[in-house]
Every structure is written in structure tokens, then in C-alpha cells.
Image: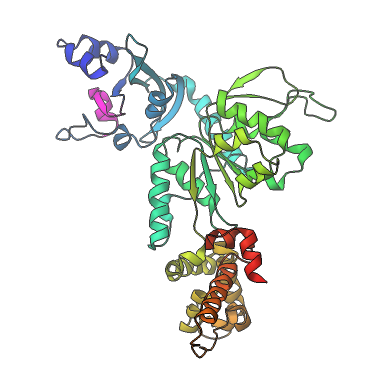
């Protein structure tokens, strides 16, 4: 197939490039891998590319971190009119996919207009004002967390950081799995911020916090007069608000079965139907779902649709519990403590060595969220020059160390004692969840109960 690079190389007299430049003030062309093939001189000046720097062959996001060009290449859909700020200057941008004779995407071209746009200034101001209003009302939340903000260098944290970065470069559905308090929403924000959708909205909704009667209207919106008491103008749903960006569905396992079919349509067809409407609306949204539950078990119980489970489980990412990354606690505690004391205007007290030992010996059933709560408690309770272990919690909350027992020469009793210790450790690490403990031990739940007797 002919690539866009080949077409440009065949244009020896630059007729095509001159034509592109004549359409607008600036223009750029990228290939199917989102690398720069050509950029007009005016565009180089606009974004301050030095004359001695050659941008050809570079990823377009290196030059334009907020560009939507990769999205056009991956989706094959044009973005005809968009507002974009470049060097604090409002621009009108049009982006078009380029196809070959076989209708395969071979790149994209972008056109920028910034001259004589005074008549559009009210539109720019309204766009910025509406966005601020949405953010103030928490309808649209800018992602406040980046992957670079992820604290810790333990092996589980490094693996999670690598997985999240790879996921950010894709545009597929994500499923974040982990215990409560492990930071699933913060990770979703970081992935959004590292993706090509970073300029789009990040819209989050907790399915577990919504009454079932309101959940559908909240997520998919309502048509005008859809039901008694409905807004006459209708209601825009979270799916529509997330158009062009990321929709984060926390506690997805709590979504009512009736709504799951409508979410499946969004994932499969990229379209949504508002409550009380008979019109389908196209949406371009990336969905990141999260849950602390085992969705496979929910499917087996008939509480979650199997087809939706497979649609969501395209790229699962497991967030490790804090007890599996204890070496990250000093860095986490230092960062959180500084933030807590600044926000609360409390004295800047350090953690004593005994307090740090307490943190590293605790089992953390509430994970990172509980760590922050313990540190807040310590800041309030401390009366000396440092936060002590007693300010964080009692000694009774720490696992008790058993005195070493005399080794028995009976192999059977030794094996039984070792087995007992392993089972107790597994149940403790799983916060009393025997199903999870059985999985950790590599045995069936029935075998675990038999051994517990």
C-alpha cells in the first residue's frame, strides 16, 4: 500500500505541501505511527522549533503535548472544528485522517487558523467559562494526578507504573482491580493524563453511591420530559460529558443489570441512548472501570453480565495492596505527612523511629487510604516533638509475635504446625477472606475449611 510518506516523497515540486499551507496559517502531517512527516514553516515559528532542530520523524506529541492528531489516526474520524490553545493563543484547529485506495488509514493532516479570529473571541471565552463551571461543579474533573506522582520504588509499584504507562498509550477499555483504598481513581487519573485524551474531560462516577432509580439518568442522561419531574431541557449524562475524554466507572460491580446492556452498547457501538429518548447519539469516550470485587464470581452468581465482563476485561491491571509494598511506606508517609500538615496548618512534626516501625508492621486492611487517615490521627494526637507510635494506634493492632516453639522430632506434627502457620498468615494477609486465602495457598476453599477444622 502507498504510505503518506511515499506520497509526499513523490511530490518533488512540493505542490501538495504548498496546497496544504495555502488552506490555513499552519499545517502539519503525520504518518500512521503518529510521527511527523512534514510541518509548515509557520507552524515551526508558532511553537518555537529552533532552526537547527529537525522535527521530522519525531512523535507528534513531543512537539504538541496536547495534540489530538493520534486520536484521529487511531479512530479514523475527523475533528472538523476544535478550539486549542498554543502558546497561550487561541486557535481553531481541523484534523483530517488520510486514507489510501484501500481505505486504510495512512496518516493525518492538521490545519491551524489563528489570524483574524477576533469575531470568535466570545466563543473562546464561553468555552473557557463553561469548562471552569463544569470543573467547579465537579461535573468535569481535571485529572489532578499524573503517573509521575506515583510514590514508591518497590517491585510491585514499579511493575504497576510500567503497566499504567503502556495502558495510557493504548485507547482500549481498562479494568482496574484492587482492594478498597489502593488508589484506583488516582491511577485512572494518571492514565488519562498520560494518554492522548489528556485535553479531554475526565469524568468519574461511583456506581455504588447512586440509588438504582437515579443511576440510569445520571449515567446516560434524560430526554426532555422523560418522566414526571424531569428537567424540561433534559439532562446530559456522564457518558456524554466525557465525550472526547475518559469516563471512570468506580465500583462497576454495583451497576444494576438493566443498565449493563446500555453500557455494553457504548463499548461496542460507541453510541448512547438517553432515558426517554429514541435517538442514538455517537460518543467518543474511553472507559476505565474499577472494582474491589471478583467480577468472575459475580458473573457465576448471575449478578453481572458475562458479555460486559469480557468487554471490560480487555486490559486488567491489578493494584497491589499496601502490605505487599511495605518498603514504599517511608516515602508515602513523608509525602502525605507534609501535605496533611500544610493543608491543616498543623505543626510540622516528624515521625519517630518507633512510629515508622509501627507503620511498617501494621497489616493495612484499608491500604493507602487508611495510611493517610492514621497519619492525620497522628498529627492531631501528637503532644511531643514527634509523632509517636501510640499516636497512630495501639500495640494490640499489630500482629503478635509468637515465641519460638521447641522443634518436635515428629515429622507429621511438624508438617501440621507449618501448615497451620501458613494458613494463619494467608488468612491474615487476606483480611479474613477465606476464599482469597485459599487462592493464595493454591488450594480449594473446601480444602481450606477441612484444614481449619
Return the residue nearer the eye: 49 or 202: 202
On screen, residue 106 versus residue 126, left or right, reads: left
- Displayed quadrant of residue 41: top left
On screen, residue 376 versus residue 73, left or right, reads: right
Tell me: residue 215, above or below residue 120: below
**Residue 40 counted in the magenta span:** yes
**Residue 230 counted in the magenta span:** no
Return the residue nearer the eye: 160 or 189: 160
Query: Residue 17: x, y in percent?
Result: 24, 14
Query: Residue 248: x, y in percent?
Result: 57, 41
- Displayed quadrant of residue 166: top left
Residue under the point 56% across and 60% down: 443
- Displayed quadrant of residue 52: top left
Quarter of the image where the C terminus is located: bottom right
Query: Residue 283: x, y in percent?
Result: 56, 25
Asked if residue 206 shows in the view, the reply is no
The segment highlighted magenta reads 33-48
Residue under the point 41% across and 62% down: 152
Tell me: residue 215, above or below residue 346: above
Return the residue nearer the eye: 168 or 406: 406
Residue under the point 40% across and 23% down: 93
Return the residue nearer the eye: 374 or 117: 374
On screen, residue 274 versus residue 86, left or right, reads: right
Asked if residue 452 shows in the view, the reply is yes
Amino acid at each position: 500500500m502507498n504510505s503518506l510518506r511515499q506520497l509526499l516523497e513523490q511530490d518533488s515540486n512540493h505542490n501538495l505541501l504548498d496546497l496544504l499551507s495555502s488552506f490555513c496559517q499552519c499545517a502539519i502531517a503525520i504518518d500512521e505511527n503518529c510521527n511527523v512527516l512534514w510541518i509548515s514553516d509557520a507552524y515551526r515559528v508558532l511553537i518555537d522549533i529552533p532552526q537547527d532542530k529537525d522535527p521530522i520523524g519525531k512523535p507528534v506529541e513531543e512537539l504538541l503535548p496536547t495534540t489530538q492528531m493520534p486520536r484521529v489516526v487511531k479512530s479514523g474520524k475527523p475533528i472538523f472544528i476544535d478550539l486549542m490553545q498554543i502558546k497561550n493563543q487561541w486557535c481553531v484547529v481541523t484534523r483530517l485522517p488520510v486514507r489510501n485506495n484501500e481505505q486504510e488509514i495512512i496518516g493525518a493532516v492538521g490545519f491551524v487558523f489563528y489570524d483574524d479570529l477576533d469575531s470568535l473571541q466570545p466563543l473562546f471565552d464561553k468555552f473557557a467559562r463553561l469548562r471552569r463551571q463544569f470543573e467547579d461543579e465537579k461535573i468535569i474533573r481535571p485529572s489532578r494526578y499524573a503517573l509521575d506522582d506515583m510514590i514508591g520504588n518497590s517491585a510491585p509499584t514499579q511493575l504497576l507504573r510500567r503497566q499504567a504507562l503502556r495502558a495510557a498509550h493504548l485507547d482500549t477499555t481498562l479494568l482496574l482491580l484492587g482492594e478498597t483504598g489502593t488508589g484506583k481513581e488516582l491511577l485512572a487519573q494518571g492514565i488519562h493524563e498520560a494518554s492522548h485524551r489528556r485535553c479531554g474531560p475526565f469524568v468519574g462516577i461511583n456506581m455504588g453511591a447512586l440509588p438504582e432509580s437515579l443511576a440510569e439518568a445520571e449515567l446516560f442522561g434524560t430526554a426532555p420530559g422523560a418522566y414526571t419531574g424531569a428537567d424540561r431541557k433534559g439532562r446530559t449524562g456522564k457518558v456524554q460529558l466525557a465525550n472526547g475524554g475518559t469516563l471512570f466507572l468506580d465500583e462497576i460491580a454495583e451497576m444494576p443489570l438493566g443498565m449493563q446492556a446500555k453500557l455494553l452498547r457504548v463499548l461496542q457501538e460507541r453510541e448512547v441512548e438517553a432515558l426517554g429518548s429514541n435517538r442514538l447519539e455517537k460518543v467518543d469516550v474511553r472507559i476505565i472501570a474499577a472494582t474491589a470485587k471478583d467480577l468472575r464470581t459475580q458473573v457465576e452468581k448471575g449478578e453481572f453480565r458475562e458479555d460486559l465482563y469480557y468487554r471490560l476485561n480487555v486490559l486488567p491491571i491489578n493494584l497491589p495492596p499496601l502490605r505487599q509494598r511495605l518498603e514504599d511506606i517511608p516515602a508515602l508517609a513523608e509525602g502525605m505527612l507534609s501535605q496533611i500538615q500544610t493543608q491543616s496548618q498543623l505543626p510540622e512534626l516528624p515521625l519517630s523511629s518507633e512510629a515508622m516501625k509501627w507503620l511498617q508492621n501494621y497489616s493495612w486492611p484499608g491500604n493507602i487510604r487508611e495510611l493517610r487517615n492514621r497519619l492525620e490521627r497522628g498529627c492531631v494526637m501528637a503532644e511531643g516533638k514527634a509523632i509517636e507510635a501510640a499516636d497512630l494506634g495501639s500495640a494490640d493492632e499489630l500482629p503478635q509475635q509468637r515465641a519460638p516453639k521447641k522443634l518436635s522430632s515428629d515429622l507429621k506434627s511438624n508438617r501440621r504446625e507449618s501448615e497451620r502457620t501458613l494458613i494463619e498468615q494467608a488468612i491474615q494477609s487476606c483480611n479474613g477472606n477465606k476464599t482469597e486465602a485459599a487462592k493464595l495457598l493454591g488450594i480449594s476453599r473446601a480444602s481450606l475449611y477441612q484444614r481449619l477444622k
